[in-house]
Amino acid sequence: GAGVSQSPRYKVAKRGQDVALRCDPISGHVSLFWYQQALGQGPEFLTYFQNEAQLDKSGLPSDRFFAERPEGSVSTLKIQRTQQEDSAVYLCASSSRDRSYEQYFGPGTRLTVT
Amino acid sequence: AQSVTQPDIHITVSEGASLELRCNYSYGATPYLFWYVQSPGQGLQLLLKYFSGDTLVQGIKGFEAEFKRSQSSFNLRKPSVHWSDAAEYFCARKAAGNKLTFGGGTRVLVKP
């Protein structure tokens, strides 16, 4: 596709449920990033992949958060046993090998935990 | 830790007036700096970037930004705003591993 796509766009989960958020990066982009954006805040880094390798997961807030990119393209961010504090917009971004510092963002998934 | 600060949470400007959004970054080597815009319900769109060279950079939608090392600033400007410029603006810098560190954002409201 032309840009980064994310699904679902909106997700409502009851506290304790598991959720999976999907990111389709721009075709050919080797780097993929996940960010969390709480209401009224700037995005905060969660994790980073280069191809299928997860090179940095320092921003994942707890071991309930898990991300994967098994074939170096689509990525899934999974949150187990969701808590109310997980409510946020989850943004995915990708970048090319040649311009790795220039990230293109998807529209985000708004997660609401009730 | 390297950080980015946007001192203004909200700015209201009249349509046709000029706009300046402030951004300060913490210590570090010459930073890679970015400005992004986020419209309601949308992802972040890159407006412009600075890596090196000319300290005045031009971006899309008529925006420009000036890097001032002495002031640790990278302020965004537009000479004449349009109603469609109402959005939230984020300043960011590249951190280790190409991840971005963002400021808290400035929400711009445009009065008719």
Image (cartoon, grey):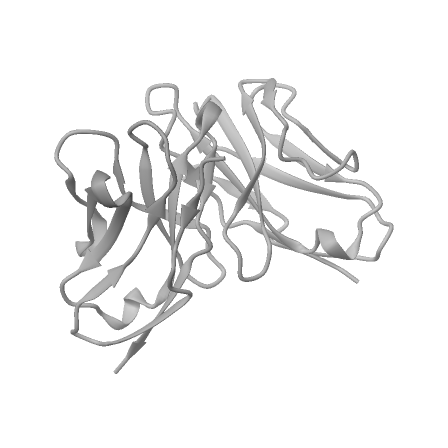
The residue located at (20%, 54%) in the rendering is: B63
Left or right: B68 in relation to A21: left
- Taking the view exactly as shown, the residue that stands out farthest to the bottom is B112
The residue located at (17%, 68%) in the rendering is: B18
The count of marks equals: 0
Query: What is the quadrant of residue A23 in the picture?
Result: top right
Percent x, y of residue B81? 21, 68
Is any atom of residue A73 visible in this view? Answer: no
Percent x, y of residue B82? 22, 70
- Taking the view exactly as shown, the residue that stands out farthest to the right is A16
Is any atom of residue B86 visible in this view? Answer: yes
Left or right: B99 in relation to A88: left
Query: What is the quadrant of residue B16 in the picture?
Result: bottom left
Q: Nearer the viewer, residue B1 or B45?
A: B1
Percent x, y of residue A59? 62, 35
Residue A73 lies, with reference to residue B86, above or below; the image says above
Residue A30 lies, with reference to residue A46, above or below; the image says above
Percent x, y of residue B4? 41, 45
The quadrant in which the C terminus of chain B is found is: bottom left
Left or right: A86 in relation to B59: right
Q: Nearer the viewer, residue A48 or A52?
A: A48
